[in-house]
Amino acid sequence: MTASTLPVRPRDGASAPGAPRPVTRRRRGIADPGRGVAYVVAVVVIVLMLAPVAFIVIGGFRTNAQITTDPSGLPSPWQVGNYLDVLTGGTFWRQVGNSLISAGATTIGVVALGLAASYVLARYRFAGRGVLYALFAAGLMFPMTVAITPLYLVIRDLGLTNSLAGVILPQIAFALPTTIIILVPFLRAIPDEIEEAAFIDGCSRLGFFFRMVVRLSLPGVITVGILAFIASWNSYLLPLFILNDPSTFTLPLGVQAFSSQYSVDTARVLAFTALSMLPALIFFSLFERRIVGGLTGAVKG
């Protein structure tokens, strides 16, 4: 057999001569129409979500006369006085401090109590464990709006009205169900061999908890901490019922009070609202990957 009569072997990934070409879903130069529609819908949704935020931020750079004349126009000229008045005033920073205290204490309480309770539910076998877990899961079905009236009565009887403690304690309680639901799969996924090896090396149960469990479940801990912080920072209904003293107002409640006090100064109200949104937006943007990664790990677990 001569070289000219040898069969030609197709290269990897190439079809033999004369064989029908495989049908591909998308050929070169032909775009997938479904993907294009998805991009268009995504862009429309993003624009609809960002348009109110952009209106508030840009509105803070305008004067009341400009807003009255052309509500949807751009500042001409741009005014920074509204933002400077808010930043140089003591009200805004006092409310930022109250929100930081409330959100920080809530986050610490949620992480500490939620991690301890999740460790017991995930690693210990005892009678009523399933019932206790179902009880925490049932807490997701009772939002704070349903229990706000009896909750206010309890806080009043405890003498915690007009104090940040009256806001922090209920926020911890209502955040625990979500925290436990997220953390239990993380802790169940820890192999028993690691725990047995730690006990053989002389590690106590508390030592194993602090040295191994906390580190291995760190993605879930970060996720629940971020969720608790953001929920506390944006909380409005509970502070509205508990706090009556302006010196104890958190930032969401302060926005409502500021809007009522300066209702005729629309530009200044928009500036105050824009600055109030900024910390939560920055915080969420920085830790968005952490939230998604933690929730993904909880689902896999």
Image (spheres, helix red, strand yellow):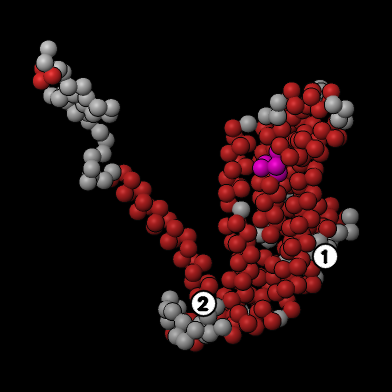
Q: Residue at x 61, y 53 (%)?
A: 287
- The answer to whether residue 148 shows anywhere in this view is yes
Q: Which residue is mark 1?
A: 162
Which residue is outermost to the top?
A: 1
Which residue is outermost to the front?
A: 2
Dot 2 or dot 1: first in sequence order is: 2
Q: Residue at x 63, y 69 (%)?
A: 276
Q: Amino acid at mark 1?
A: Asn
Residue 57 at what x, y percent from top left? 53, 73
Q: Amino acid at mark 2?
A: Gly
267 falls in the magenta region = no
Q: Quadrant of the C terminus?
A: top right
Number of dots carrying numbers: 2
**Mark 1: secondary structure:** loop
Q: Disc 2 to disc 1, how far (Cα)?
A: 33 Å
**Mark 2: secondary structure:** helix
> Vertical placement of 247 versus 68: above or below?
above
- The answer to whether residue 142 shows anywhere in this view is no
Q: Residue at x 15, y 25 (%)?
A: 17
Which image quarter: residue 215?
Answer: top right
Residue 222 at what x, y percent from top left? 68, 47
Q: Which residue is mark 2?
A: 59
Mark 2 touching mark 1, by CB under 8 A?
Answer: no
> Is disc 2 surrounded by few (<14), some (14 to 19) or many (20+) residues within 10 Å?
many
Q: Quadrant of the N terminus?
A: top left
Residue extent of the magenta highlight:
217-221
Q: Nearer the viewer, mark 2 or mark 1?
A: 2
Report whether 67 appears left or right of 127: left
Report whether 22 appears left or right of 199: left
